[in-house]
Amino acid sequence: MIDVVFEGGAMTNASQVEKLLRSIESGLGKSNLFVVVCDDPKLRESVIQSYEEALQAVSSLEVDCCRSAIDLIHPNLKDTLSILLNTQSSSQFQRVATIVGVDELLTLRLDGEVSPQDQFFASVKWLKWPMVGLEMPIVLWVSSEVAAGLAQEAQDFWSGRSGVFEFKPSPIAAVEQELRQTIEDCERSLRLVAWSETLEFAGRLRELATFYEAMEWGEKAVPLYERVLAMYGSALGDRHPDTVQVAELLAEWYELTGRYGLALPLYVQSVEMARSVPGGGELALATALNRLAYLHRLMGDLTLALPLYQEALSLRRSVLGDDDEVTATSANNLAGCHLAMGNYALALPLYEEALVVFDVVLGRLHSRTQVVRRNLLVLRSRLER
């Protein structure tokens, strides 16, 4: 299965992972300190696995990822780093060290003794970065409390860091509770009013569908979008922006749930609407073409998808240029269609073009770059057969 590079934004934690990966990559073979602040153990483990797997997936980097936990009784960062230096792997590998356990240090002072956390602060107080002989990036995981303590108690150490990254768990429970209450209020108001055929009522239905969508209750959102689309189409016409927007939302849900036959006419309508915009609508048209092309791929109609991908790429080249990330995304997706059709010679330069752009714009470790690299590897393996 060939990966498709999807278009769209990223959540905050995901973008932080990408930034951390790029920083680690640029710091390979150098003494760099990256401080990562996180209070959630599960999130911390997930992020560590993400960047370790990404680093090791790029064979050209030859990276050895290692972890070490700080001593909870006598915490000393320099001692921990010395152990890492004494266990160097073979010279052909560049190393990345992850230090954990600092968030578990006790803050209590028993019988006048210095607490483990204060011992840790003292152990780093005079450490300066870069450290001689430590030619590797160090990723130090701390809690928000420890980060504040480091900034206050070990200013030289803190100022020598190469970067600080913060990961916060999404407040899902609070958001969900608020959404549930909003949904209940909206449902109650809809039962009380008597304007069920007005545009105002359609707007409230659309608002409720949006809340359902936010809760990932697609089975409740879809019939509301269907009803709103019918009301908007009747009152506003098929070409009104509100009608088109609801049609696109409904088409996405149909596609997501495998109802391709219902999604198809809505995507076709979206393309026709984009074509009718006089001047300046090239990028909107390219997006609509790309969506329709992807739906045809899902339906197995590659011959219908191909010209749509080609037109989308041509439009993006003319507006954005060859070196733009969005243009590279189109090149990758057109290459994927060629590859699926067995047009290997046509797919190869498109994959190579996309990879060059993503390497420069996003970095070798970005998830999109790795998708294109995997696609290119699949193609080359088939060419060698």
Image: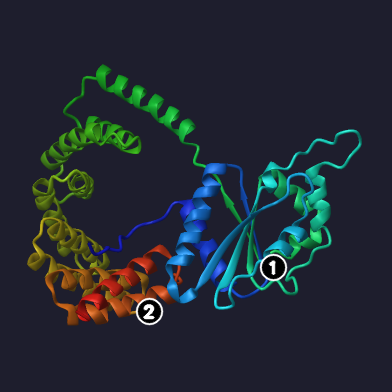
Q: Is residue 279 above or below residue 66?
A: below
- Furthest residue in direction right, as rendered: 112
Drawn side of residue 124 relative to residue 242, left or right:
right
Please state the horizontal and vertical placement of residue 126, each as a whole percent of the image: 84, 62
Q: Residue at x 42, y 75 (%)?
A: 359
Q: Nearer the viewer, mark 2 or mark 1?
A: 1
Identify residue for label 2: 356
Q: Name the quarter where the C terminus is drawn.
A: bottom left
SS type, badge 1: helix
Q: Splitting the image into 4 quarters, where does residue 78 fall?
A: bottom right
Q: For numbered disc 2, what is the local secondary structure? A: helix
Categorize mark 2 by other alpha carbons within 10 Å: few (<14), some (14-19), many (20+). some
Q: Residue at x 27, y 23 (%)?
A: 190
Q: Residue 308: x and y, percent?
A: 15, 68
Q: Which quarter of the image is occupied by the N terminus? A: bottom left
Number of residue marks: 2
Q: CA distance from mark 2 to mark 1?
A: 35 Å
The three-letter code of the residue at mark 2 reads Val
Q: Residue under circle 1?
A: 85
Q: Earlier in the sequence, mark 2 or mark 1?
A: 1
Mark 1 crowd level (few <14, some 14–19, many ≥20, 10 Å Cα): some
- The kind of residue on which mark 1 rests is Leu
Identity of the residue furthest to the top in this view: 192
